[in-house]
Each structure stands twice: as C-alpha cells, then as structure tokens.
C-alpha cells in the first residue's frame, strides 16, 4: 500500500512545477558547463586534453567558477523545491486528510517520505547522468590529462587521487566512478529533501519557505563551520558530494547520511502517529 | 506605553544569532588584539588584513556571511505578504488609500531591517570585545556606520522584493528568485579581477553586493583611506549609498505600482504552482 502510494505520488510530483523548475535549472547549469567546455577545448590536441569525466558539471576542478559558485549557493534551496513543497501544499489544502483517512496517517506520511526521496533522486540525477554520454561523444576518450597537469606516476598525483571519495572505483574506471558519484550525489540530495520532508511531517508551516529551512540551514552550517586550513578534514557538503574533489576528507563524516535518514524516518513516524487535523 | 511587537522581537533575535555567528566565524585577529576598523572590514568580506579576493572559497565565504541575512529575509518576506494570505479583503476594504497602507508596511520592513542590522553589528562587536582585545579607532566607528547604513538599506530592498515576489509566486519560488539574484551578484564579484575593462567596471559599480564590501572602498578622509588601504578603485561610500538607495527606491516605487494594481487574492499563493 505504502509503496503503491509512493510510486503514484512520485509520478504526480515529477509533473509538478517545482520538479520541472528544478530539473530545468539543473539542466541549464549542466548544458552551460558542457558548451563552455566544448568551446574551450575545441581543437585541443588529444595529448593535452583533459579526461572527459573530469569535465563534468559535478567536477569542480574544470567547471566555470562563476556558474559553479552560483550552483553551490542555490543548491541548499533547490534541493527541497521538487517535492517537500508539494507535501506542504497537500497538508494546507487538506488533501492529506482525505488520503490519510483512507489509508491511515502513518502509511500516508511514510509513503510521502518515500515519494519525496524518489522524486528528488530522479530530478537531481538525470541531468548529470545525461552529461556522461554527452561528454563521451564530444570529447576524445583517449584523453588522460587532468586539470593539475600532473604526471600519472607522480607521487603527488597518487595522493591527489586518494583524496577522492570512492578513489578505488576511480582507479578501477573513471567512467564507473562518474556514474557511481552521480548516483551518490542524487542519493544524498534525496536524503536532504527527505530530512526537510520529515520536518514538514512534524510541524505545520504556514509559509512554504520555512519548509526549505532544515536542509538550507544544515547544508550551509557544514560550510560555515568547515575548517579553512587544508590540512584539517573539511565538513563542507560540496567536498563530499562533488566528483574529483581533492580536499582532505574524513569518510566517517558520511555517517551523517544514515543519521539523517534515521531522523527523517523517526520524524515521519512521529508526525504520522499524531493528529493530522491540527 | 510602547509595546515591542512580536516581529520586532523576532528580527532582534535573528540579529542576535547573526551577531554571534559573525563574531565566532568571521572575526579573525592574527594576534589577540584587533582594531575596530579591521573587525568591521572582516564582517563585510575581508579576510584578515586582506581585502575580499573573489576565489571560489572566498565567494562561498561571502555567501555564508549572508546566511543570517537570508534567514531574516525569509522571515521579513512574510511581513507584507501575510496580509494577502489571510484577511486581505478585511484589510483592503477598510483601507481606501492602499498606497498609504503600502508605505506603512514598507516602513515596517525598514524598521525590522534596521533592528536586525543594528543588533547584529552590536552583538558582533560586543562579543568580539569579550573574546579579544578590540581597539576602538575613528575609522572603525566610521566603517561601522557605513556597514550599518548600507546593509540596512540592502536588506530592506531584498526583503521588500521577497514580499512582492511572494504575492505573485508564493514564498518558496520568491525565496529562490531573491536568493538566486543575490547569489548571482555574489558570483559576479569575480569581475573585480578585470576591473580595468569598461564593461566589468560598470557591472561592478551597479552590483549591489559589490557596494557592500567596505574593503574595496576609498575615502577622502585620510585616516579612513589608510585603514582600508584598498588596491581597487571606483568604490567609495557616497556612490555606494547612491547605488544601494537607488535599488531600494526603485523596488519601493515599483512595488507601490504593483500593489495598487494587484487584485485582492482570491486564493492563497502558497497553495498554487508547486
């Protein structure tokens, strides 16, 4: 019942304005990066060419810094736009009472959580998955260079590679790394959206802008409180979510993701077992 | 007896939070002591004794300086708009002069912004005084006034804009537009690297966020100019005040036209669209 409702709701959420706006914003950012790279590297010798996967939008090293900074600034707001707002809308219109009365409030809120997760995952993953074959078609696959122009056997290059999250997958294949990294990006985005949705399940916000706050504050807090010196592991979200990021990381900080999932489930269960008419 | 309104109290509380965060995260003396001028420069974007330099990490640092301001804008963005969500018929049938109502609401937003900016700055200074040895100097006092005035006007502008966009699109899309516009302005600060060219120089001059970075300013007051020691040209207090005030005036006046011709909401914008 829950899964059936979640899938139906995901199909509906994907057609709503919030999902469409977010998808096209991400698509524009991706296409801008792609066109920027095509114009920048046209006619470049294959020996001097950067690896096609390092030219992805989610790879901050080769991206246009102005666009990248705009993307990084609006991401904490954008991540909640596709689905959390429709959850809030359902609660404000009373549609939630209608559905909850038929299937039970707990089933409804849990189904909504799954739907928020799936909608955000699809919206945040698809534009960047499209970019992978686009780059493979447009740039030479023989290219092995990187933005640092380091020798492949340089010990510094080895250290640089080991700073990546999932560096073992990168060593196995940069293409698999790009796909896994993009799916991880979508998964984390979905977790942040689900975290915000759990708040909406617990607290009835009068203005939808406040339902964006939990994810917005959490993500920006990681940037605000991140150490500025490079020899201390960063906690800023973008160092963990972007591909080919060579900033020193502490993988144990990724425990924040299961903790957020747990908080989201507990918050949703709490919200689902309380009176939905309030 | 004058009673402090609930929204003034909330603005002051967000200001308090902003001041605490600013003192904790952005005031960084090299030694145990810091002059007031250096402290205010750091609050408006400078890092240490160096002026704001738009690398990606510093642009993100600049954005984080705006997070408490965005929090306030989220809250202040409902001050005018809330009248359109509930009881708009009640309000506008009893207000024959809608223009006067609009200017009264604008004054309310201005007051809240002033309270927020003042509490934020005072808290940051006082907290820094507890943490470090803050040396009060004449340029520091002047820079504090500049910082307070410019930020108050810009926060008022952004908050009114958020209210107006909320009436059209609802608060969520309005927040995305207003924060998005400010994010673009912050990203466009990188034009300072090519400020010698005409177009980037003009774009920088009309960028409201660039006019808030005191570390880029020049002054006719020798002590102040020496305290800032900016390598850039083209920014000073009076033109910056003119640019920021122009945006504010433009927003307020176009908002008036919009409000006058806006029919009373038949449905709640929060429920439409998304």
Image (cartoon, rainbow, N blue to C red):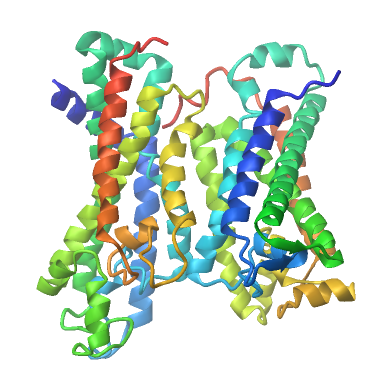
Of residues B269 and B118, the one nearer the viewer is B118
Q: Is residue B195 above or below residue B209?
A: below
Where does residue B191 sit, x and y in percent of width and height? 60, 73
Count all numbered tags in the image, as a single digit. Answer: 0
Residue situated furthest left in the rendering: A172
Where does residue B84 sit, x and y in percent of width and height? 62, 22
Corner quadrant of residue B167 = top right
Corner quadrant of residue A190 = top left
Residue that appears at 22% across and 73% down: A162
Residue that appears at 39% across and 19% down: A91
Corner quadrant of residue B14 = top right
Q: Quadrant of the C terminus of chain B?
A: top left
Where does residue A19 sit, x and y in percent of width and height? 34, 40
Q: Is residue A211 above or below residue B44?
A: above
Residue that appears at 74% across and 39% down: B115
Where does residue A245 sit, x and y in percent of width and height? 31, 69
Q: Quadrant of the N terminus of chain B?
A: top right
Residue B69 shows up from this direction: no
Of residues B120 and A102, the one nearer the viewer is B120
Residue B180 shows up from this direction: yes
Residue that appears at 23% across and 25% down: A110
Seen in the image, is A273 located left or right of residue A223?
left
Seen in the image, is A45 located left or right of residue B127?
left
Of residues B261 and B65, the one nearer the viewer is B65
Of residues A256 and B97, the one nearer the viewer is A256
């Amino acid at each position: 019942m829950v899964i059936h409702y979640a899938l139906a709701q995901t199909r509906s959420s994907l057609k709503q304005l919030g999902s469409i706006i977010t998808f096209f914003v991400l698509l524009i950012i991706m296409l801008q990066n792609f066109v920027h790279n095509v114009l920048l590297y046209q006619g470049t010798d294959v020996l001097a060419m950067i690896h096609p996967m390092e030219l992805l939008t989610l790879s901050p090293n080769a991206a246009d810094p102005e666009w990248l900074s705009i993307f990084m600034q609006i991401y904490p707001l954008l991540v909640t736009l596709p689905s959390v707002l429709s959850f809030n809308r359902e609660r404000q219109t009373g549609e939630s009472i209608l559905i909850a009365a038929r299937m039970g409030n707990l089933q409804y809120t849990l189904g909504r959580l799954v739907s928020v997760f799936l909608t955000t995952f699809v919206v945040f993953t698809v534009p960047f998955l499209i970019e992978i074959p686009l780059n493979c078609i447009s740039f030479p696959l023989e290219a092995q260079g990187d933005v640092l122009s380091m020798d492949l056997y340089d010990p510094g290059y080895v250290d640089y590679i080991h700073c990546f999250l999932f560096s073992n997958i990168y060593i196995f294949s940069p293409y698999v790394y790009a796909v896994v990294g993009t799916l991880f990006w979508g998964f984390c985005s979905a977790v942040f959206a689900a975290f915000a949705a759990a708040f909406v399940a617990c607290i009835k916000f009068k203005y939808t802008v406040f339902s964006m706050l939990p994810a917005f504050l959490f993500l920006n807090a990681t940037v605000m409180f991140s150490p500025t010196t490079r020899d201390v592991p960063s906690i800023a979200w973008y160092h963990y979510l972007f591909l080919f990021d060579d900033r020193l990381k502490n993988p144990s900080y990724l425990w924040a993701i299961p903790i957020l999932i747990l908080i989201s489930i507990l918050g949703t269960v709490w919200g689902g077992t309380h009176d939905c008419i309030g | 007896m004058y009673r402090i309104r609930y929204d003034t109290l909330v603005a002051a509380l967000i200001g308090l939070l902003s001041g605490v965060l600013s003192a904790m995260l952005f005031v960084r003396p090299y030694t145990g002591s810091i002059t007031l001028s250096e402290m205010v420069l750091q609050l408006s974007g400078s890092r240490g004794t160096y002026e704001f330099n738009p690398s990606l990490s510093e642009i993100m640092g600049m954005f984080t300086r705006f997070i408490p301001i965005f929090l306030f804008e989220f809250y202040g963005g409902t001050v005018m708009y809330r009248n359109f969500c509930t009881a708009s018929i009640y309000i506008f049938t009893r207000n024959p002069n809608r223009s006067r109502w609009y200017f009264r609401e604008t004054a309310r937003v201005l007051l809240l912004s002033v309270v927020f900016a003042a509490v934020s700055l005072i808290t940051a200074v006082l907290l820094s005084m507890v943490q470090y040895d803050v040396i009060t100097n004449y340029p520091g006092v002047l820079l504090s006034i500049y910082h307070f005035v410019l930020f108050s006007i810009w926060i008022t502008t952004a908050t009114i804009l958020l209210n107006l966009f909320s009436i059209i699109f609802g608060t969520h899309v309005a927040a995305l537009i207003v924060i998005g516009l400010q994010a673009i302005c912050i990203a466009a600060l990188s034009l300072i690297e090519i400020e010698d060219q005409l177009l980037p120089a003009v774009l920088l001059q009309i960028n409201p966020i660039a006019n808030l970075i005191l570390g880029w300013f020049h002054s006719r007051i020798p002590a102040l100019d020496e305290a800032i020691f900016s390598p850039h040209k083209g920014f000073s207090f009076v033109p910056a005040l003119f640019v920021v005030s122009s945006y504010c005036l433009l927003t307020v006046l176009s908002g008036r036209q919009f409000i006058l011709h806006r029919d009373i909401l038949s449905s709640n914008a929060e429920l439409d669209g998304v």
